[in-house]
Each structure stands twice: as C-alpha cells, then as structure tokens.
Amino acid sequence: MPRRLLPWIVAALVPVCCLAGIALVSTAEAPARAGEPDSWALLLIGVALSVPVATALVILRERPGNRVGWIMLVGPAPTAIAFVLESASLAAAGRDGSAAAAVLATLGMSLWPTLYLWPTALAFVFPTGRPLSARWRAVLAATFAAAAVVTVGMNIGDRVAYIGDLTPANPMYVEADGVRRAYFVLFWVAWAIMLGGLIAALVSVVVRYRRARGVERLQLKWFAWGAALIPLALMLCGLSALVVRGGVLDWMVVATVLGGGTALSAAVGVAITRHGLYEIDRLVNRTVVYTLVTALLAGGFALVTVAVGVLAGRGSAWATAAATLTVAVAFRPVRARTQSLVDRRIARDRYEGLRRVRAFEDALRRGDAEPEAIQQALAEALADPGAELLLHLPEGGGHVDVQGRPRETPSDGRAVTPVRLRGEEVGRLVHHPRLRERPDTLRSVLVAAALPIELARLRAEVRVHLAEVEASRARIVRAGDEERRRLERDLHDGAQQRLVGLGLALRRIQRSLPAEARVLVPALDQAVGEVGHAITDLRSIAAGLRPARLDDGLAAALDDLARAAPVPVEVDVDMGEGDLAPPVEVAAYYTVCEALTNAAKHARASRVDVSARRRDGALLVRVRDDGVGGARPGAGSGLTGIADRVGAHGGRLRVDSLPGAGTLVEVVIPCGS
C-alpha cells in the first residue's frame, strides 16, 4: 500500500461509519427509536466527527508524518465505531434481536469515553508532537490504560442495556461477587485516573505555554480557545450520570463534546498550518466579550420578564415586549463597557496602547501636540522605543520620515507593517519583530492612529514640496547669476575689447592724417569720445550684473555702497572666518542696495545704519534708517524683489516700519557655518 494513501484510507473509516449508522437508525422501529434524535441531528453528528479527520488530512498534506495530524485522524474512529454499533443495536432491537442488540448497545456505549482521549492526547503533545518529558509520557499512558479499564468495566458492569425506551438484559454482565467488588474498585479508580489525566493534560498545556515563546505560544493560545468547550461537556456528562440517564441531557452532552471537538479541530488546523495564526488574541477577546454580554443580557431579559410579569400579570405580552426593548437598548452600552473591562483585564497592552493613542489625539485637537509627534506616541503605545514611522508620498514619491526627509525601508531585521486609511497605504511602521506576536494590539493601535498619521503625512508632503520649490528657486537664482557672469565676461572679453581696439585704430588714423586732412581731427576726436562713452556704459552694465567689488568680499562692496550713497551710511560688517557663497553675497548686496535706495528716495532719511553678521550658520543683514517709515513689503516692487531673492536661498525678510519711526529691513539667509 502506498504510504501516501494510508491517511486517506484511515480517514474514510469515520464518514463510512457515520453514514452506515444513519442508514441503520432509519430502519429502526419504535420503541427502540424513542428518545433518539432525528436523521438530520445524526447527520450533524457525522459531520462533527468528520471535521477532525478533514483537518488532519490538511495537516498531513502540508506536514506528512506530523503526530498531531495522526492523532486527529485516528482519534474520532472509536467514536464513529460506537455510533455505528449503537445504530445497529437500534435496528436489531426492532427485529426481535434483543440479545444481539443489547451487546451492540453496550459495546457502543462503552466506547463513548474515547471522545475525551484524542483531545487529551493532543493536550499532552501539542504542538511539537512530543510530551514535555518522560514523566508526562507516563501520565499519558496511564490515562489511556485507565480508559481501557473503564471501557471493559462498562461492558460487564451494567445489568441492562439502554436502547431507546427498551432495557434488555446485558449478556456480558458478570454477577460473581468477587468480580463485582473488583469491578467496582477498578472502575472508579480508572475513572479517577482518567479525570486526573484530563487535569494533567490541562497542566501540561499551562506549563508548555509558560515555557513557549513566539509562534509556539500563539499555537497554544489557539489550542486553549478550541478546547474551552470540553470542560463544559465534562460537567454535563457528570450531571447526566448522577441525575438522569438518557433523554435530552445525554444528547446535550454529545452535542457539546462534538462541538468542542469541532472547535478544537479548527483551532489545531489554524495553529499547525499557521493560516490566521496571529488572529487568536482578537478571537479570544471577542469570545469573552460576547459570552459575557450574552450572559448579562439574558439575565436582564429574565429579570425584566419576571418583574413586568408580576406587575402586569403572568403570561402578559407586555413582559416580553419590555424585556426585548430593554435588551435592545442596553446592547451597545453593555457591549462597550464589557469590551473596556475585558481589554483592561485580559488585553492590558491593547487597552494601554489605545488609551495612549486617544490621549495623543485629544492633545492634537487641543493644539498641545504636533502631528509629527505621532511616531513617539506609537513607540510608547506599543512599548517599542525603536519604532520608526515612514510616511508614504503619493505618485511614486517613496517614503519620508516625520520630518519630511527621504528614507528607505530598513533591512536590519526589523518587521514592517503597513498603515492604511480607507484602503490606501499612508505609511509604514518599522518595529521590533516581537510585536507580531501581539497582532491584535498592533493592528488596533495602527487603526486608531491612522488619522494622526495621515495628518503627519500631509505635513511631510508639504515640507517636501516646499523644499523642492526652494531648491528650484535657488537653482533659478544660481542660473541667473551664472548667466550674468557669462554676459559680464562676454562684454569684457568681446564687445569692450573690440571697442577699445576701435578707439586705438581711430587714434592711429588721426595721427597718420596728412596736413590737408586735418579738418577731420575734430570728427575723429568725437568718434573716439563716443567709443569711450560706450566702453564706460558697458562697464556700468557689467558692474550691474555682478558688482566687481564683491570680488574683494561683501565688506568691501558695502563700503563702496556707503561712499556712493546720497545720505550718510554707517557700515558694520563681521563675517567671521571663511568666505560666503557667491549667491549669498549677491543677495545680501542687492538687499542693502534696495534698502539704501528706498531710504534716500522714499523715506527722506538723514542717516542709515547697515550691519551684516554671520551667526549660527546664517547671515543676518540689517538696514535701519531714521526716515518717515510706513514701508510695506507688498507696496513696492523693490521689497518684493528682495523677498523673492532671499526666499530663493531659504531665507526670510522682515520689515518693521511704523509711520514716523523709521524703517528696519532685516534678512536672514542660511549660509552654512
């Protein structure tokens, strides 16, 4: 037999037995079927038994040889066999086969305790496939041995078999007194060992969880969530054995156990295959919340029904209506309050993280915080000091930090989680990988912080665009300065030199004229004079393109301006060490030029003070006059031109000009240190 076909052959046993059992029950006659479920209920039992098998096939397909998969594959088989044996007893009882029916019913009933065996085995070995140690392996073996004793005891210990409303004698019953006493002791000792094995399985899960880290801890959370119904099934089983046998309570036991097996199978499948592994925290949280909400609302419904029934009369429709209205109105506040209490108790990190993010949002609304502080708020909310927020720029702009500086997604081993708002990525959080073990906390905090992150992204985008505009303006100014220098060189080396050569040529012609042509001398003198004027004009134009005096530094150029100004000017320059960049010198020079022109032309000033100092990586230029004041940056093209020129270098202009108090023009231009 091919090894890969073995799981499929074993898996076929459970659905075949279930279908056979359903078919046999359908042939049974009353009173054997009295108290038994309908065919659809039996079909649900078959489906519930088949779920672990189907999950096992998925696990073994991805991880052949996995012990957990094989336990789930083989574990439901005894229960399926019990099902088909009891179904066969129903069919046999309807055909006068009382002895055979009693044997089949007793054998089937004795196999039902195996429902607990495969979940117990899973608890001892999940998720590694091995018990924690040899001692735990011995406990598991003792539990299975006790189950075998219980099975044998159930076969020989009951006088009658239970088949619907029929109670035929059990042919396997042993009446010997010695055997009866031994049976009584061994049977209940075995039950105690089985119960101890179940408790030991729970302890094993707890011990393994405390030792586990990372993915294994999440897998154990899934297992614990899936096994939560099994203790309830045990309590119902004990109640059924002590209080009443047969009837609805027995089927409640079976339904609860099968439901627990189904939930456990689904949880184990998720944990082993790791599809949705990180959703367990949210699932546990929601399970606890809605269980408590259901219990509270059900209690409230019953209380209101009784109270209104006492007042309005028993059976009054007002009682049901009032209770329904109360539950409907109370649902939202009860759920919100319960969610808060559950988060505070069993999801403390999520509760604290959301509280910090909401506190930051409140501070943001009040104006006590800036959107850029969201990175620090996220780091505190997630208890990850190294968390870094990268903001996504649209249209392929890449990512920037909260200050708008370009950043690449780091590849240093940290995890990266996208932040989305309305389905679009607005950023990425770079964080410690351990936060992936708390996915509900991480997701909830990022969802709560999405709006502040979007605000930070928009501000970063504005910073990037402003930087691009400033860089573009600076490039335009530099290009203009370079073009002016080129024109200056062209004028000096080209037209000016040709004019000088033309003047010299005219002088040579003048000196070489014969006596009879001396009448042309005045005309030649005039022509040479015009050439000289043209040279002077060209030199003035060239000097206006870039002051030649700036070649000796800003201080020398400002001294020249002061000497040529129509009003007294006091100059104080302190450039410190190092030279200024030529574009910065030109911007400062023309700022002083425009300010002196305004002081003499519009302000009617009698004195002007000019200062220029380099401090903390910036050039500070101030021009103060004692004129009439009242100047406004938008009122004249000169001040507007200064603002544009200074702004192109990332600087700023300030004009302080109260009427009658003079004018202060101040510019600050970044220039390095």
Image: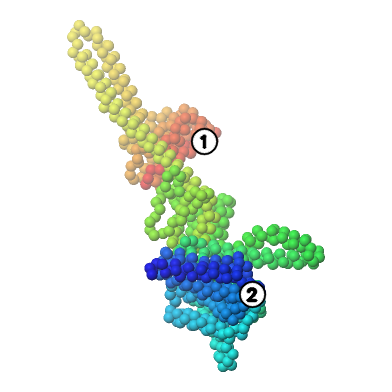
- Is residue 247 toward the left or the right of residue 200 in the image? right
Q: Quadrant of residue 31?
A: bottom right
Look at label 1 and name its amino acid: Ser
The residue indicated by pointer 1 is: 657
Q: Residue furthest front?
A: 95
What crowding class fits label 2: few (fewer than 14 Cα within 10 Å), some (14-19), or many (20 or more)?
many
Give the camera-side residue of 161 and 209. 161
Q: Residue furthest top?
A: 516
Give the camera-side residue of 148 and 177. 177
Up the image or down, 551 lies above or below 460; here it is above
Q: At which x and y percent is residue 618?
A: 40, 44
Q: Residue at x 51, y 72 (%)?
A: 76
Q: At which x and y percent is residue 425?
A: 48, 50
The residue indicated by pointer 2 is: 32
Up the image or down, 17 lies above or below 376; here it is below
Q: Residue at x 49, y 48 (%)?
A: 424
Residue 659 seen in the figure: yes
Q: Residue at x 29, y 14 (%)?
A: 526
Number of numbered discs present? Answer: 2
- Is residue 667 toward the left or the right of residue 23 in the image? left
What crowding class fits label 1: few (fewer than 14 Cα within 10 Å), some (14-19), or many (20 or more)?
many
